[in-house]
Amino acid sequence: MLAMRLRLARAFGLTKLEALSMNITTTIRPWGLVLEKNTLVAKGKLSEPRVIPATSTYAMNCLDIASALFTSNSLESTIFEGSLRARSLQLRRLLQKLHVQEKIFFSSASSQERESTRVGAKWAKVQKEILKESF
Protein backbone atom coordinates (compact mmCIF):
# COMPACT_ATOMS: atom_id res chain seq x y z
CA MET A 1 0.00 0.00 0.00
CA LEU A 2 2.80 2.40 0.86
CA ALA A 3 4.56 1.51 -2.38
CA MET A 4 1.45 2.51 -4.32
CA ARG A 5 1.33 5.87 -2.54
CA LEU A 6 4.98 6.43 -3.49
CA ARG A 7 4.26 5.57 -7.13
CA LEU A 8 1.32 8.01 -7.20
CA ALA A 9 3.43 10.72 -5.54
CA ARG A 10 6.13 10.35 -8.14
CA ALA A 11 3.75 10.13 -11.11
CA PHE A 12 1.63 13.13 -10.08
CA GLY A 13 4.15 15.35 -8.27
CA LEU A 14 2.53 15.10 -4.85
CA THR A 15 4.08 16.38 -1.66
CA LYS A 16 4.80 13.96 1.16
CA LEU A 17 1.79 15.11 3.17
CA GLU A 18 -0.53 14.88 0.17
CA ALA A 19 0.64 11.38 -0.68
CA LEU A 20 0.35 10.06 2.85
CA SER A 21 -2.90 11.77 3.85
CA MET A 22 -5.06 11.46 0.74
CA ASN A 23 -7.96 9.03 0.71
CA ILE A 24 -7.08 7.12 -2.43
CA THR A 25 -10.53 5.60 -2.98
CA THR A 26 -12.17 9.04 -3.21
CA THR A 27 -9.24 10.82 -4.88
CA ILE A 28 -8.83 8.69 -8.00
CA ARG A 29 -10.73 9.56 -11.17
CA PRO A 30 -10.40 7.83 -14.57
CA TRP A 31 -8.44 10.83 -15.89
CA GLY A 32 -6.33 11.79 -12.85
CA LEU A 33 -6.51 12.85 -9.20
CA VAL A 34 -8.76 15.29 -7.35
CA LEU A 35 -7.14 16.25 -4.05
CA GLU A 36 -9.53 17.71 -1.51
CA LYS A 37 -8.68 20.65 0.74
CA ASN A 38 -6.01 19.34 3.08
CA THR A 39 -6.89 20.36 6.64
CA LEU A 40 -3.54 19.07 7.93
CA VAL A 41 -1.60 21.83 6.14
CA ALA A 42 -1.24 25.05 8.12
CA LYS A 43 -0.53 27.35 5.16
CA GLY A 44 -3.74 28.32 3.37
CA LYS A 45 -2.45 28.35 -0.18
CA LEU A 46 -0.80 24.95 0.16
CA SER A 47 -3.98 23.36 1.50
CA GLU A 48 -6.24 24.35 -1.40
CA PRO A 49 -7.84 21.61 -3.54
CA ARG A 50 -5.97 20.46 -6.63
CA VAL A 51 -6.98 18.68 -9.79
CA ILE A 52 -4.08 16.79 -11.37
CA PRO A 53 -4.60 15.10 -14.75
CA ALA A 54 -2.60 12.04 -15.74
CA THR A 55 -0.22 13.28 -18.42
CA SER A 56 1.68 10.07 -19.14
CA THR A 57 1.02 6.40 -19.66
CA TYR A 58 2.97 5.70 -16.46
CA ALA A 59 0.55 7.93 -14.51
CA MET A 60 -2.46 6.21 -16.09
CA ASN A 61 -1.02 2.80 -15.21
CA CYS A 62 -0.50 3.95 -11.62
CA LEU A 63 -4.12 5.09 -11.48
CA ASP A 64 -5.40 1.76 -12.78
CA ILE A 65 -3.31 -0.26 -10.34
CA ALA A 66 -4.15 1.97 -7.36
CA SER A 67 -7.84 1.90 -8.21
CA ALA A 68 -7.86 -1.90 -8.36
CA LEU A 69 -5.75 -2.24 -5.22
CA PHE A 70 -7.63 0.17 -2.98
CA THR A 71 -11.21 -0.48 -4.10
CA SER A 72 -11.02 -4.27 -4.07
CA ASN A 73 -10.27 -4.39 -0.35
CA SER A 74 -10.92 -0.87 0.91
CA LEU A 75 -11.77 -1.89 4.49
CA GLU A 76 -8.75 -4.17 4.71
CA SER A 77 -6.46 -1.54 3.22
CA THR A 78 -7.65 1.09 5.70
CA ILE A 79 -6.95 -1.20 8.63
CA PHE A 80 -3.65 -2.40 7.20
CA GLU A 81 -2.34 1.08 6.37
CA GLY A 82 -3.16 2.62 9.72
CA SER A 83 -3.24 6.32 10.53
CA LEU A 84 -1.30 9.12 8.88
CA ARG A 85 1.20 9.01 11.73
CA ALA A 86 1.72 5.25 11.28
CA ARG A 87 2.20 5.64 7.51
CA SER A 88 4.68 8.47 8.05
CA LEU A 89 6.67 6.47 10.57
CA GLN A 90 6.64 3.40 8.32
CA LEU A 91 7.88 5.50 5.40
CA ARG A 92 10.64 7.14 7.45
CA ARG A 93 11.90 3.78 8.72
CA LEU A 94 11.78 2.22 5.26
CA LEU A 95 13.68 5.07 3.62
CA GLN A 96 16.31 5.05 6.39
CA LYS A 97 16.74 1.30 6.06
CA LEU A 98 17.17 1.53 2.29
CA HIS A 99 19.31 4.71 2.46
CA VAL A 100 16.97 6.51 0.04
CA GLN A 101 16.24 10.26 -0.03
CA GLU A 102 12.61 11.47 0.23
CA LYS A 103 13.14 13.94 -2.60
CA ILE A 104 13.22 11.05 -5.09
CA PHE A 105 9.50 10.50 -4.53
CA PHE A 106 7.98 13.75 -3.33
CA SER A 107 7.55 17.22 -4.77
CA SER A 108 8.75 20.22 -2.80
CA ALA A 109 6.64 22.79 -4.60
CA SER A 110 6.16 26.16 -2.99
CA SER A 111 2.80 27.90 -2.82
CA GLN A 112 3.87 30.23 -5.66
CA GLU A 113 4.71 27.29 -7.92
CA ARG A 114 1.34 25.74 -7.19
CA GLU A 115 -0.45 29.02 -7.82
CA SER A 116 1.14 29.21 -11.26
CA THR A 117 -0.35 25.81 -12.14
CA ARG A 118 -3.73 27.00 -10.93
CA VAL A 119 -3.59 30.04 -13.23
CA GLY A 120 -3.90 32.78 -10.68
CA ALA A 121 -4.57 33.30 -7.01
CA LYS A 122 -8.34 32.95 -7.28
CA TRP A 123 -8.29 29.60 -9.07
CA ALA A 124 -10.30 27.66 -6.47
CA LYS A 125 -12.99 30.35 -6.27
CA VAL A 126 -13.34 30.59 -10.04
CA GLN A 127 -13.54 26.79 -10.37
CA LYS A 128 -15.82 26.35 -7.34
CA GLU A 129 -18.71 24.67 -9.17
CA ILE A 130 -16.47 22.28 -11.09
CA LEU A 131 -14.70 21.33 -7.87
CA LYS A 132 -17.99 20.73 -6.06
CA GLU A 133 -19.12 18.40 -8.83
CA SER A 134 -15.78 16.58 -8.74
CA PHE A 135 -15.96 16.03 -4.98
Image (spheres, grey):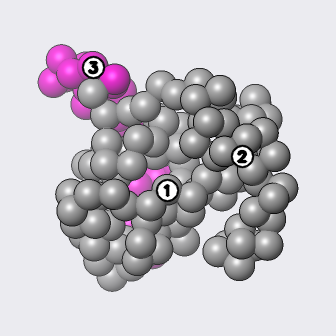
Where is residue 70, by image quadrant? bottom left
Quadrant of the image containing the N terminus: bottom left
Q: Which residue is mark 3?
A: 101
Where is residue 46, by image quadrant? top right
Measured Cα–Cα span from mark 3 to mark 1? 24 Å
Tell me the crowding category of disc 2: few under 14, some 14 to 19, or many 20 or more residues within 10 angstroms, Cα based. some
Give the numbered dot on residue 52: 1
Q: Main secondary structure of the magenta part?
A: helix
Q: Secondary structure at mark 1?
A: strand
Q: Amino acid at mark 1?
A: Ile
State which mark lies toward you, 3 or 1. Answer: 1
- Residues shaded magenta: 75-103
Measured Cα–Cα span from mark 1 to mark 2? 13 Å
Q: Secondary structure at mark 3?
A: loop
Sequence-first disc among 3 and 1 = 1
Q: Residue at x 73, y 41 (%)?
A: 120
Q: Amino acid at mark 2?
A: Glu
Label 1 near label 3: C-beta < 8 Å?
no
Sequence-first disc among 3 and 2 = 2
Q: Secondary structure at mark 2?
A: loop
State which mark lies toward you, 1 or 2. Answer: 1
Q: Amino acid at mark 3?
A: Gln
Membership of 89 in magenta stretch: yes
Give the numbered dot on residue 48: 2
| Residue 129 position in % (x across, y down) | 79, 72
Q: Nearer the viewer, residue 11 or 84?
A: 11
State which mark lies toward you, 3 or 2. Answer: 2
Q: Is residue 75 above or below residue 92?
A: below
Q: Residue at x 41, y 41 (%)?
A: 13
